[in-house]
Amino acid sequence: MILDFKEIPEANKGTGIQDTFELFTRDFLSLLGYRIVQGPDRGADGKKDLIVDEVIKGITSEYTIRWLVSCKHYAHSGRAVKDSDEINIGDRLRQHGCNGFMGVYSTLAATSLSGLLQGQENYIIFDHEKIESYLLGNLEGHRIACRYFPLSFKRYQLENPTPAKIFDEEAELCCDYCGKNLLLESVHGNYVSLRKEGLEKNGIEPKCEDIYFACSGMCDNVLQKKFQAKGLYDIGWVSIDELCIPTIWLMKLMAFINEIQKKNDMSDTAFEKTKKLFINTFPYVARHLTQKETMRIRNLLMFDIM
């Protein structure tokens, strides 16, 4: 589990914030699209915590399921919700005019409760794992998670960084062969610096003539052959994934600036592409390092290959 439900205060202690799990449930169900008919209160609730409506639309008609919502916050003890915790479900549904039972639990439903619910026409259980998957699956869910799970959600953000919103449009760095965006998490690629052949044989240090961006593997091989046919060969390459690690990005940028200060060893084409590289990768590096990236930096420094 990523989200620690123990961050929500216990429900059976008169601290003034004992209703927090019910308030969380209200916000969570609103996120999913349920209409809140009756929210949490501290009065005699007749064994219900909330009542919500779900409107189900068909092709020619629609109907509404009115759910009786039962909140059980047992995360602090860790015990499952048993059948003895949810008594007289049918009577409770009739009392409140509901035709569906919904359990929202910070732990799991015990097998005894699952068996009891088999007799209900409409029932659904949101346990801690289902709740977490919904919250972490979209931006609005992140806002709710940040409010109710501030510590564990902060840890999640550190280990699952997203690009900073800096530009109006999503930053792109496209493969020069297939056009895929190399900044997507599912795509892996490199940028390759190119020089003309043979200059170093005459005692002339090779100048960076061009740069290409490529997916790892086939695209890189195709572009390499394409540029070789023009008399351009690679000086070196860097992984786009590694460049998006803040420490490596900063080191490469400083090396780029130092080279500019020292000598003019880049063509205008290569210079413009290098600027494009740093501009479009910047949203990915303006953040803390993940644990995985920290270990990668240590390994690179150990072998002194940066």
Image (spheres, rainbow, N blue to C red):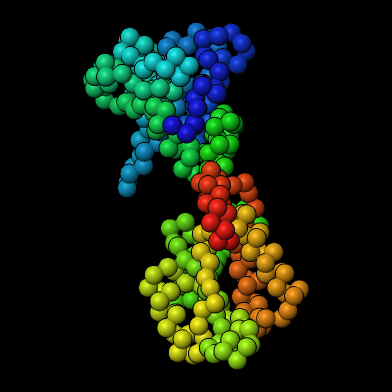
86, 286: nearer the viewer: 286
Percent coordinates x, y for residue 144 in the rendering:
55, 34
Farthest-out residue, right = 261
Please determine whether, in this image, residue 133 is positioned above or below residue 295: above
Percent coordinates x, y for residue 151 in the rendering:
58, 31
* Count of numbered circles on the image: 0
Please determine whether, in this image, residue 242 is positioned above or below residue 151: below
Q: Would residue 51 be found to the left or right of residue 255 on screen?
A: left
Asked where in the image residue 115 lies, by quadrant, the reply is top left
301, 119: nearer the viewer: 301
Q: Residue at x 59, y 8 (%)?
A: 14
The quadrant of the rendering that contains the N terminus is top left
216, 97: nearer the viewer: 216
Percent coordinates x, y for residue 289 in the rendering:
59, 47
Q: Is residue 122 visible?
A: yes
Q: Residue at x 43, y 10 (%)?
A: 46
Q: Residue at x 54, y 77 (%)?
A: 235
Asked where in the image residue 155 lies, by quadrant, the reply is top right
Please determine whether, in this image, residue 298 is positioned above or below residue 64: below
Percent coordinates x, y for residue 3 in the rendering:
49, 31
The quadrant of the rendering that contains the C terminus is bottom right
16, 90: nearer the viewer: 16
Q: Residue at x 42, y 28 (%)?
A: 128
Q: Would residue 221 be found to the left or right of residue 298 on screen?
A: left
Q: Is residue 35 visible?
A: no
